[in-house]
Image (tube, rainbow, N blue to C red):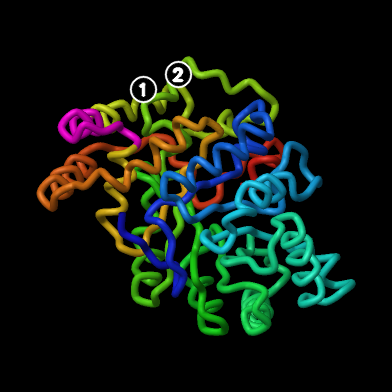
Amino acid sequence: MDVRKLGNIEVSPIGMGCMGLSHGYGEIPDRAYSIEAIRKAYAFGCTFFDTAEAYGPRPGVLGHNERIVGEAVHDFRRAVVLATKLHLDTNEVSAKGLEVVVREHLTASLDRLRTDYVDVYYLHRINPDIPVEDVAGVMGILVQDGLIRGWGLSQVDADTIRRAHEVTPLSAVQNIYSMLERGVEEEVIPYCLAHDIGVVPFSPIASGFLSGKVTAGSDFSHSDDVRKYVPQLRTENMEANQPILDLLESYAERKNATKAQISLSWMLHKYPNVVPIPGSKNQERILENLGAWNVHLTDGEFAALEAGLARIPVHGHRGFVERQGSSMANWNRR
């Protein structure tokens, strides 16, 4: 297994998105099961774990996921890379000052993660009231203080990345990217490639669609299942996007792999700075996804797969940041 880099931070080629252990995919698993899932991922070879202060069963209650991750990796903390995220509230920053607020959030995250530093500290969402250049300046101070090794942005365009990177070099950018959502290929990934910034795709299996295991009959009725809001998982769009699954299946049979593994192998082959973080609350699925780093496409296979994808239109784009009114309150924690 090769390693990849987020800036100068080495990680496994695929990481583990831990959100689903606390939020987003229906009933959350038992805490012991979640901790075991993270430890199994590490034993399998995963060294990159992604969490956030906002991931939890209820909005406004911070840290549920960070506590699980912190307990799970405590015995091998120095051997793994931890990424977490903070939100910035305009009123809070106005009252206390930006650096004070960022330090308070980081201190709380460090406590929940049971560590004295974070490897990658993301701004979870851009707050239009707070210049990203100012955030970058504070992140640079935290790097100098040894509290974080690097920093990142989530769901941002290339211009925002450029403005932030010019103040304090970014380690990573976390945006949506999959075979169904390829907008970052236009400007974001090229800029990041040119400036040694890692790209960390969330939802790289398109909320499970590319695995073939999420179907029109899947139940998303739980109040905390964000998949009910994903356009690609509407019945009409799943039916329209079936040719992509058929294409993946043809490669899966040839490579003795799963459709999810082929979709992940495709992005690993395409870009050397991409480190996907598929998320799941199922231990078997987590290990299956990590196993994609052992599935290698030849240059010819990759070219044929790319050509096949180019002939198939995608239905139900989520867009840059999907909006569904007030019903998206929980989803925006992603």
Callout 2 secondary element: loop
Give the labeled residue for mark 1: 239
Tell me which corner region of the image, top left, top right, bottom left or bottom right, holds residue 27.
top right
Callout 2 amino acid: Ala
Name which residue lies at 56% across and 33% down: 281
Please, is residue 18 above or below residue 188 in the view? above
Question: Whole-percent x and y of residue 17?
Answer: 53, 46
How many residues crowd around disc 1 within 10 Å: few (fewer than 14), some, or many (20 or more)? Answer: some
**Membership of 259 in magenta stretch:** yes
Q: Which span of residues is magenta-colored?
A: 247-260
Answer left or right for 151 relative to 142: left
**Membership of 237 in magenta stretch:** no
Give the labeled residue for mark 2: 216
Query: Reading the chain from its start, which is encountered first: label 1 or label 2?
Result: 2
Q: Main secondary structure of the magenta part?
A: helix
Q: Are marks 1 and 2 in contact (CB under 8 Å)?
A: yes
Closer to the camera, 292 or 197? 292
Name which residue lies at 77% across and 60% down: 111
Question: Whole-percent x and y of residue 18?
Answer: 58, 44
Callout 1 secondary element: helix
Total number of numbered discs in the rendering:
2
Closer to the camera, 57 or 49? 49
Question: Whole-percent x and y of residue 108?
Answer: 78, 61
Query: In this view, which residue lies farthest toward the front?
Result: 75
Name which residue lies at 26% across and 28% down: 243
Please, is residue 43 above or below residue 10 in the view? above
Answer left or right for 94 relative to 152: right
Answer left or right for 329 relative to 192: right
Callout 1 amino acid: Glu
Q: How far apart are labels 1 and 2 at the CA level? A: 8 Å
